[in-house]
Amino acid sequence: MLRKSLLFLLMLMTGASLTAQLTVTGTVTDTSNEPIPGVSIIKEGTAIGTISDINGNYALEAEAEDILVFSFVGMVTQEVLVSGRSVIDVTLKSSFMDLDEVVVIGYGVQKKKLNTGATIQVSGDDLQSRNSTSALQALQGQTPGVSITSTSGQPGADMKVTIRGLGTIGNSGPLYIIDGIEGDISSLSPSDIESIDVLKDAASAAIYGSQAANGVVLVTTKTGQVGKGQVTFDAYYGIQQVARYADMLDRKEYITIMQEQAANSGASLFNPSVFAGAADTDWVRQMFVEDAVTENYNIGVSGGSESSIYSLSLNYTGQEGVVGGADVSNYERYGFRLNTEHKLYNDALKVGQHMNFSYIMRNGIQVGNQYSNTLRGAFGTSPIAPVYSDNNLYDSPYNDTSGSAWYDGDGNPYGAMMTNNNNQNNDQRLLADVYAELTPVENLTLKTVFGMNYYAGAYRSYTPLYKFSVYNFNEDHTSVNQSMSKGHTFTWTNTAAYSLNMGDHGFDVLAGMESIQYQGISVNGSNWDLLDQFNSWEYAYLDNTTGQASLVEDEEGNITGVTEKRNVGGGPSVQAKRTSYFARLGYNFKEKYMLNATFRADGSSKFQKDNRWGYFPSVSAGWVISEESFLSNSGDWMDFLKLRASWGQVGNQNIDNFQYASPMIITNWDSNSPAGYYLFGTQLALIPRVPILVVWPIPV
């Protein structure tokens, strides 16, 4: 319903009279009148655009009322109304010239000029102009030193992000802080983001201590502005197509090659009549769909008065998989965001909240290594195998009686994909916080934030009966798997910040503490044999299964064991806690010489009781050389030059629980056997069956 409503609103807003187009040309230069190649010029609200050539020239078809958006990394984005002009020359200014602009740092903001860490900021407008399904996709190529790659081509697949190389073993992804609370950036729509700041070096990230070994990404979502209420609508609709397919053998080429193989090996050649009426299938192309849709719609309302501001949005994102289409590979995300802030007592007190909720539905194919993936079979199946049989069902060459050794047992990779990829994930994510900010005296700010990161997920899968080859079959039992999990993280942060200017000297001081607690629960179950009348994906739930435990007998009728078709499990996640204390001191002289230092102490329940605390200091300094007298005449060829140096320590507490205790996992325990097996590290060993009391350490 939401998707249809958004499409209807899009048609209402875009349905208009036809206007004449004109070709707009021009040159893009910098403040030194040097041409800028590679500048992106896009018609606002669309994906239609071009880039400037090596001489800064461009040409673009546009209408009189169009707005052209000129953007380039390191330059201030500029919007220009066409207004019937056919020639528009643009001069872009360096973004580094606006040195009074603030950037987001740990637990606060700082003037860009005074920042001595390795940070980079990307505006929400730059992200939105990329027309991508996720914020991380939009961030690709805009952040030097940050590598962002897709883990697979599956719709909604995670992105692998590394900042200045791998910082730790295991999970090397950065920490994501959304409006001050640790969260999942994939749940956000790019249209809801005001800016993203990346803390790349240890000095700037050390304020986050034991979580910052792989860098920190700070996300600020959009807030309202004082003034008349505004309604915005952003949308895009695109088609995904495969640019190039692998060139596979057709029927004639395949038969020729196989006959040559038989001749070279001394085997008898097959009579060509055997292949009369054989299929001619390009299995690789068969696995893909021609036009896979990707789309995004976002409706936003914002505004406010001198005492209260608000910003809310409703969005939908959808992406179909190019392999198999939406039936087997699809991603949908519905989102709602609400941010408000209110000023009380002559602006001495501010209270507000951030809230982002997303509902995500996804299903997918196998995207494992070179062996465990859905596409593998398409590269090894002969083209003479048909996709469908005479009754329009997926054909099964296993049952063929043609006598062709090239045909029997080939399988049907397309049929297997469409038959055996019945799965779905439903996830709900809520990231919310409330805050209060008090200014009891001038330049002193006391702030408290209470945040919650809540998730709930459900998974369901179904395996029907099928037989496509001797290697790809399920002939005995249908099966159903269901699982559910939920959990939450509470975060409570308190900070005190004070700034003081004494002539040419400026001081900024921050002190704070943070407490975080996580806990969750999960349950799962599986069973065999769906009821005959409910034997389909639509009814594939555990309540509709009939599988029960059965006795196993030997040839003489003696009971030798039990086969259990049902499997259930569930339990709580181990509660994890962390307490932190941190401080930052900043000093500058005439905004020319800067010194910043931070310190953080983290205590984590994931470590042994006597080794739970870690300490993370940092120090950085900067020198604005361009403001020295010996460079007073450099404005013609250099706008700004700053030299900085930094040092810091960061850590990683993102490990499994109880690793310090060398946990032992007992498996394959047979009630009729005097012994079982246990996993110790990576080795499987035998353990005698004796009474054992297992006591797990409990975090304090």
Image: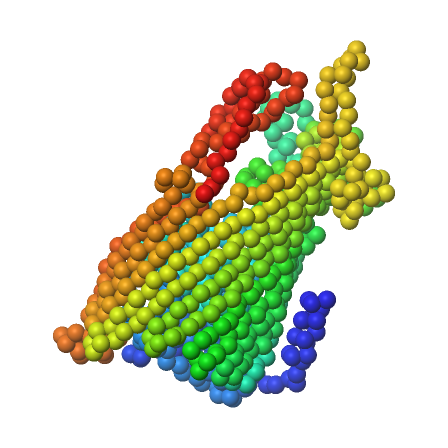
Q: Which of the pair 597/415 is nearer the observer?
A: 597
Dividing the picture into quadrants, the one containing residue 191 is bottom right
Above or below residue 55? Residue 283 is above
Visible residue check, residue 589: yes
Left or right position of 647 against 240:
left
Q: Residue at x 72, y 28 (%)?
A: 564
Left or right position of 465 against 233:
right
Q: Give x and y (percent) for residue 186.
A: 53, 58
Return the residue found at the far bottom: 84
Q: Residue at x 69, y 43 (%)?
A: 482
Q: Quadrant of the C terminus?
A: top left
Visible residue check, residue 122: no
Q: How many marks?
A: 0
Q: Residue at x 73, y 23 (%)?
A: 562
Above or below residue 600? Residue 352 is below
Left or right position of 527 against 96:
right
Q: Quadrant of the N terminus?
A: bottom right
Q: Residue at x 21, y 69 (%)?
A: 593
Q: Give x and y (percent) for residue 553.
A: 77, 17
Q: Which of the pair 319/89 is nearer the observer?
A: 319
Q: Which of the pair 137/580 is nearer the observer?
A: 580
Q: Give x and y (percent) for residue 369.
A: 54, 40
Left or right position of 557 against 144:
right
Dividing the picture into quadrants, the one containing residue 332 is bottom right
Q: Give x and y (percent) for residue 116.
A: 28, 64
